[in-house]
Amino acid sequence: MLILGGTGEARSLAAALVDTPGRSIVSSLAGRVSNPALPVGDVRIGGFGGVEGLVDFLRSEPIDAVVDATHSFAATISVHAVEAAAETGHPLLVLRRPGWIEQDGDTWLRVPDIATAATAVAEMPAGCVFVTTGRRDLAAFADDSRRTYLVRTVDPPIGPTPTRMILLLDRGPFTVEGEMALLGEHDVRALVTKDSGGEMTSAKLAAARSRAIPVVMVDRPPASAGPPTAATVPEAIAWLDSVAG
Ligand code: NAP
């Protein structure tokens, strides 16, 4: 089985299957971060070379099924997986954690993309903005010299960044206490995040709720219609048992 990875769920799936008799897995990472958390078992790193490259890989390796366990914002590889699996006939499952849900006490503004998030921030009162949308998504905030941007990324930013930027290089999991302290230390007035879902990085939402800080929530790109979807690792294993039992 090929696991398209780069998420905690992909690593959990690999860990759950690595010692299962009769199963053999290979996890695939894009190679974007300098020190990735590696799944157990066999791992390949780097792009396949588009749909054609993925088709070649599926045909040349002993792969029976594919699980797309990539991040919900990794839209390109997910489309490639759908197209390649359709061409080769491989069963494909999308393993995707559910998005976050607004709770009592939250003040969320849902926006379709980063550019709209930046416009929404520009219309808010001045003050420090905490941005956790990733190192490639900072150009949209680069023209705003009125605000300080507290930016947290795993690796250093790529491309234009805000003029007044405080950069934190860190990766989750984060605690509510830690996030509360960070928001207080920098007098954060707004949070911009992608709707990644999951518990590893959700503490910032609880901290924002507790401090009555508005959240600009960037919605997920539309999912491909077609492949079945699982929300959890046990669901993904049940699917595998059904298609490649
Ligand atoms: P993307 O825009 O969907 O993909 C861009 C290209 O990167 C793909 O066309 C493919 O290259 C390669 N690629 C992506 N994921 C791959 C994988 N698992 N194995 C092999 N090649 C892969 O992806 P992205 O948003 O840059 O994300 C890259 C990786 O980081 C993903 O694996 C994702 O799970 C992880 N990640 C992304 C985010 C996010 O916010 N986007 C957050 C956390 C983790 P080829 O066309 O050459 O095959």
Image (tube, rainbow, N blue to C red):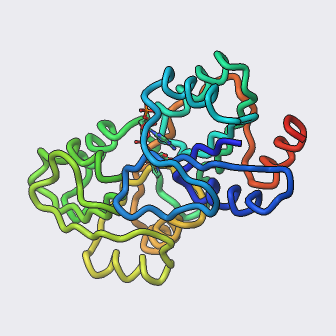
Coordinates of residue 134 in the picture (x, y in percent): 35, 53
Relative to 136, say whether 79 is above or below.
above
Which is more toward the observer, 145 or 137?
137
Coordinates of residue 204 in the picture (x, y in percent): 46, 68
In which image quadrant can residue 88 be found?
A: top right
| Residue in view at x 83 percent, y 58 percent | 20
| Residue 128 showing in the rendered view | yes
Picture quadrant of ligand 1 = top left
Question: From the viewer's perspective, is 244 left or right of 110?
Answer: right
Question: From the viewer's perspective, is 133 left or right of 234?
Answer: left
**Furthest residue to the top?**
87
Which is more toward the observer, 245 or 161?
245
| Residue 223 showing in the rendered view | no
| Residue in view at x 81 percent, y 55 percent | 234
Question: From the viewer's perspective, is 229 left or right of 96?
Answer: right
Relative to 32, say whether 168 is above or below.
below
Relative to 91, say whether 141 is above or below.
below
Coordinates of residue 92 in the picture (x, y in percent): 71, 32
Which is more toward the observer, 85 or 189?
85
| Residue in view at x 26 percent, y 52 percent | 124
Q: Quadrant of the N terminus?
A: top right
Count of numbered labels shown in the rendering: 0
Question: From the viewer's perspective, is 153 left or right of 48?
Answer: left
Q: Quadrant of the C terminus?
A: top right
Which is more toward the observer, 29 or 69?
29
| Residue in view at x 55 percent, y 32 percent | 78
